[in-house]
Image (cartoon, rainbow, N blue to C red):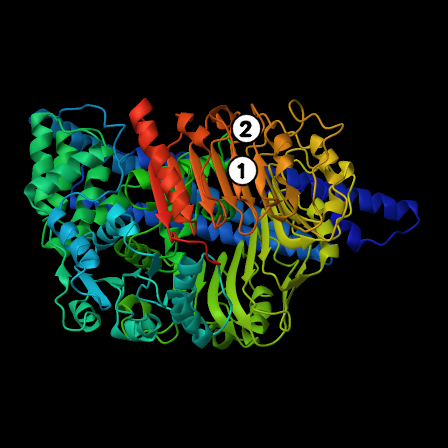
Amino acid sequence: MELDEEASPKPIKACFPRLYGKQQLAWDTILLTSRLREMAQLKQKIVFLHQNLGLLQQSVEKSEIPYDDARVRVMKDLEAQIRDASFNAEERIEMQLTAIYLAKDSLHVTACLLRLHQIFNEAEKQTNYHRNKLIRIRRRGLLQLVKGLLHKKIIVSNFSKNASKFDRKMVGCDNVLLTVLDQLTQQSTKGRQVVSIVGMGGIGKTTLAHEVYEHPSITSHFDKQAWVTVSQEYNVEQMLRCLLSCVIAASRDGGKDQLAESVYKHLKGQRYLIVMDDIWSTTAWDSVQRCFPDDNNGSRILLTSRLREVGEYASSGNSPLNMPFLDANESWNLYCKVFGKTEFLLVFEQIGRDIVKKCEGLPLAIIVVASLLSKIKEEEEEWKNVAKSVIGDSNDACSRILYLSYHQLPHHLKACFLYFGVFQEDYEIPVKKLVRLWAAEGFLRAVKHVNTEKVAMECLQNLVDRSLVIVSKQSYNGEMKTIRIHDLLRDLCLKEAGRENLLNVNVIGDEKLSFYKRKSQNLFSKPCRWISDTSECLNNQIRPGDKRFDKSHSLHSRFDYSRGFYFQALDELLSHLKLLRVVDIECGHCSNPCEVNVFASLVHLRYFALTHQCRNDHTPLYVKLFEHRNMQSFIVRGRFVKWDSSSAFTIWTMPLLRNFCVEQILSLETSSVVHRNLENISWLDPKLCTQDLFTRIPNLKKLGIEGGDAKSPDCFYNFVHLGQLEALSIREWWNLNHIPCSDIPWTTSFLPNLKKLKFMDTNLAWSDMRFIGMLPNLEVLKLINACQGPKWETSEGGFRQLKKLVIEARWSLEDWNAEGDNFHVLECLELHKCKHLQKIPNGFVDIISLALIELIYCQDSLLASAKWIQDEQLNNYGNTILVRSKNIKPERVNI
């Protein structure tokens, strides 16, 4: 924690009331001088300790020691000792800093400062001890390495930089793919059918299901498609909401019965395909299968499961399809695909083929081990040692490969990887959220002149390149949006993080929970740094004076229903967790009004996020924010969260705050402070968007505005002060019926760096888009029920840099005219619920940059128009455009 020069004298001033007299004044001056001297000495010790630990960590990571089992164990033991000593010193330092911040008299401050000096001295001795021990180990290792060089020939070359830059389309199993496609689309069986794919973890069931789900023959055959990932820790209500969001492209509130009825009604009469991925129990199938009507029209359900009995049960007597292992050629092709090349030096090709053979056709094992090899130099001895580690049957080989990849990670990436264990199984993790969490936990190395987000993205890309995490969704320009982790790798995270006393996980009870999740009735039986709770069991775990949570740095809690007791327990817990850095809570409906206090005593808190999915305003959740000088991200989501907006003023006392996102900020007093770290703020009332505010947050990159009943769009004039703004979202501004045009330099100094713009639920005219088209660097424009009127005449020469256009016009747009030079570099066009629009402008034939047209809930005439553009571009320019469609209607109906 950085000691603030302004904040440090405050406890002293508080302890000495204002007294008049020369003697008292002199005494105060002596004390103040002494404290400042002690602070300066402590600062030097902090810098020195930080440098020593950094050098020690680099030495550990650079140690090249022969990979025999004995030396591997020695290094692992040393790493564990260094980690434990660092954690212990960190915890003791933070406890003393907390005590200083909350101290009520000078005696406590003095005692804490003395203890800090002692802690730093002890930490320095520990660091020297570990450094000397590492030197001795390296000397023995180098001697052994020299002896080995005298007897063994080592070939060295650079590893492939293209490694792991591969798409995850299926390799092999062509016959299974054709069989599944045939069973899903065959017309001989009209009744509803269930097709099941079974096989062990990591064999490629989900990959095959994705390939089928997006296959052109499938998207054109079915009226509606929906995908739900069930997982071992399933939740029926979540499953139903997921299905409903796919079927009607919107979320719905309600209990299980209402949601089930809604799913049934929207599927009734439709030919549908439902994919239920990663299902573990027959009860999970029974809980939702009544939602799928059988209208004798060829509807299908595709299941994937590790358990054959589940597939047989759901398939009503039909034999499940067994997912086969890859044969030798398919395995080698997948291995080469990971490397991005097919030619290797002979010695490395032979080692590679031996390793692939030992993977016994398991795709996950091949991908992970190939990614591991691609990250190390082509040294014969190292590759042979990897080959020696891959032994045993498929399950054992896969486990060894995964652990080998984990142990090869640099030290700072190990913490980043293990942190995936705090997330629920099969959870799609938003990349922005993960980056903020890593930063708050302190995992990221400080690099001069490089912002934290870039450092985090490099770490994440490293894990992706090693195939330890999977990119789920990407933006139009290839940037990662969401990621996920395979079940087997998540199991590794849980086991390893539990072994190192980093993570305690408590999940919703299920008879099939693996042993490490149910080995004790008291799941929070020992202290740990990260707590992940999805069962609301903390109600029964907290006791007065409880020490189990004293060292915890993060609390992650997710549940779907609360009687209110949880938040009472949360208040109790937060009041005792002095070292807490992260609070991340996702909760569903509460039966009683509740209150959450983000206590000022949490002086180390850096990340607070609360997502509340309350269905009505009868049981609101009240949130109150206090001053937190270390806060980096404060995020509160939920339409019925009531928070004390007057506490928004505290952002000026949080110098490290980067993200401040709440449902609606109705009041925000400005300050004399210029906040240079704040980059993201939402949702502001338009009346707060003043010149005074914007000039005090000069580095703002992302802004959200919620208009409500505001009548004046004058805030647009003040956007000229947001020179660094990159993303702007304006929502629910019912009275926004025009954009000011006079006195705004649209083509020059007005929002010069804006790349993403979104209007949602506004009443703009289509003609206003001529001003938006002048923005010089706009790349993404989303118009979600944003414009009124039946016709859009696109102005000539507009949108010169636009790459992605998304339009949802449920009630208005009927006619759209545009030429090719209106969207000169457009790559992606998405049209959702444009039920009155009959065709895409013919001018799109001449946009040679166009790569994707996506239509959802549109008319078949619009799909025919897209396919005509697809054919014309291919014939005229040789350009291949992907046309994706979902829920296309043959005639105009209410959607």
Q: Position of residue 681 (x, y in %)?
A: 63, 45
Q: Which residue is tagged 1? A: 781
| Residue in the image at 74% along x and 34% along y | 717
Q: Where is residue 772 in the image (x, y as percent from the top left)?
A: 61, 32
Q: Circle 1 sits in a helix, a strand or a loop, which is it?
A: strand
Mark on residue 571? none
- Which picture quadrant has residue 47? top right
Specify whether 661 is left or right of 417: right
**Above or below, comparing residue 8 to residue 98 in the picture:** above
Q: Position of residue 545 (x, y in %)?
A: 55, 72
- Which picture quadrant has residue 38? top right
Query: Could you tell me if residue 129 is visible in this image?
Result: no
Q: Using a 10 Å C-alpha cutoff, classify the residue at mark 1 as few (fewer than 14 neighbours), some (14 to 19) or many (20 or more).
A: many
| Residue in the image at 41% along x and 72% along y | 260
Camera-side residue: 812 or 525? 812
**Above or below, comparing residue 494 to residue 294 in the picture:** above
Q: Circle 2 sits in a helix, a strand or a loop, which is it?
A: loop
Specify whether 799 is left or right of 414: right
Q: Which residue is tagged 2? A: 799
Amino acid found under the numbered disc labelled 2: Phe
Circles 1, 2 touching at the beta carbon (< 8 Å): yes
Camera-side residue: 665 or 17? 665
Camera-side residue: 558 or 597? 558
Q: Using a 10 Å C-alpha cutoff, classify the residue at mark 2 as few (fewer than 14 neighbours), some (14 to 19) or many (20 or more).
A: many
Q: Which of marks 1 and 2 is nearer the N terminus?
A: 1
**Above or below, comparing residue 479 to residue 182 in the picture:** above
- Disc 1 and disc 2: Cα gap in Å? 9 Å
Looking at the rendered image, the quarter that the N terminus falls into is top right
Amino acid found under the numbered disc labelled 1: Leu
From this viewpoint, which residue is outermost toward the right? Answer: 20
Q: Position of residue 54 (x, y in %)?
A: 43, 36
**Above or below, comparing residue 865 to residue 391 in the picture:** above
